Image (spheres, rainbow, N blue to C red):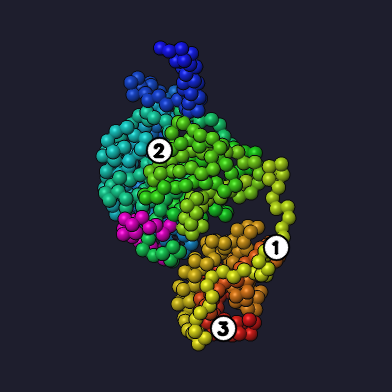
Amino acid sequence: MNKLTSTYKPMLFLGAMALILMASCNSHSNKKGSDVLPLIKGEVVAELTAAPFVPPPIDAKSNTKVVVELEIIERVMRLADGVEYNFWTFGGVVPGKFIRVRQGDLVEFHLHNHPDNMFPHNIDLHAVTGPGGGAEATLIAPGKSAQFSFRALNEGLYVYHCATAPVGMHVANGMYGLILVEPLEGMPPVDHEFYVMQSEFYTTGKFGERGLQEFDMQKALDERPDYVVMNGAVGANTGENAMIVNVGETVRLYLGNGGPNLVSSFHAIGEIFDKVYIEGGSLYTENVQTTLIPAGGSAIVEFKCEVPGTLHLVDHSIFRAFNKGAIAQIKVVGEENYDVFTGLQKETVYLPEGSAIQKVGKERTEAVDEAPVRTLEERMEKGRALYTQNCLACHMDQGRGVPGVFPPLYNSDFLQARDDKGIGIILEGLQGEITVNGNTYNNIMPAMQMSDDNIASVMTYIFNELNNGGGLLQASEVREWREKNQ
């Protein structure tokens, strides 16, 4: 051994020991107790909850037998406004009921396939050490029940799902959920815990197409979902259904991705994750902006809410959030904290090119005499597609808008009071302060370069679908306004 190696060997040893200690401090205990299983004392029936709620920890100091009763129900429910889907569910909800046990507990699992169901089902819990995660033990026809038991050997947050062939179809129809195996002593205390799970739906109709939609196998094989949603439906936890916390409180999110195909880039607009338990396991990292959650995977994130406002939980593959439904919300209420965030201090109009309002879209090239007459049904169908392409990103699904930024189009007193049926807004744009339904907005809407026929269709859709008094607008009326005012 040379002198240099002799000098640095103790330092290398100490450095390695420090890294080991840091890793130990940055994780939960993750002992796999299969060699000496803990003694089981007593029995409890698991409390299961529907998203976004999480059941309380089991109130027992020792490992116990936990009895889980979970029913499979096939039922038609809302996928989006005006859109229904025949979901296959664990517990009658999508995602399935949240299950909470502790490392070392003995879980006695009872799975029931409702007699009114049409298909056989089973369950694969990623928390299970055993064949198929329990799938082999639980394949049951409608009207049957199955029971098996397992030891929760590894702590972590795990996905469960149906594993009956064709597996992808069962998962795509809503059969997934989360099971938490926490340390015996429990997770560190926080003020709020919530359950949020992303997934995709593949429907015969396009996004927003009304009526009862069926599963489309080819779209699923091509990995082209029409919907990417949080907690089973578009807007399931937004607006009036948003999660609510107070300024200064801490939040823990148990996150899952049911897939069946896409990876989630999970992000909270307006927050930074203080801790992220990587892939739902024991190790965590800190100060994270966006975390990847694989299909069939999970993550646990924690943060403190410092200022009031609405946090948007999104898949940062961003078109999924604003065009396919992958968004949930947490409303933080309480007093402002100007030391952290001031909010808007001043707003002015910035027009460096000198134009009053910029134009968006291609120049109008339709023939002068092109003014087709369409029925209300034709206008609505065409208008729905145009709204999705041109308006949805700002004015949101069902014209809800974005508070303080983009005004709502749903039941808009501002729009209804205009004598031009909104034609002038599209053709000339809009800037400056306006009041819509009692709220003030000060923004710029660019002029849209759209044909007369397209304007007639999208405004017919907005006036009818978004509760603005109805009516049928024809391309000739748009042309007449254009000729008088431009």
Tell me the residue that label 2 is attached to.
158
Label 1 to label 3: alpha-carbon separation: 30 Å
Of labels 1 and 3, the one closer to you? 1
The image position of residue 356, as x and y in percent, is 67, 70
Tell me the residue that label 3 is attached to.
479
Tell me what residue is drawn at x 29 percent, y 54 percent: 118
Residue type marked 2: Tyr
Query: Image check: 415 left or right of 198?
Result: right
Q: Quadrant of residue 162?
A: top left
- Let me know if residue 460 appears in the view: no
Tell me what residue is drawn at x 48 percent, y 57 percent: 319
Residue 220, magenta (yes or no) = yes
Q: Looking at the image, which residue sits at the far right?
A: 346
Answer few, some or many: residues within 10 Å of disc 3's Cα (few below 14, many 20 plus, some between 14 and 19). Answer: many
Q: Tell me the tag on residue 349.
A: 1
- Closer to us: 145 or 269: 269
Tell me what residue is drawn at x 49 percent, y 72 percent: 383
Q: Which residues are magenta?
A: 211-227
On screen, residue 279 above or below 5: below
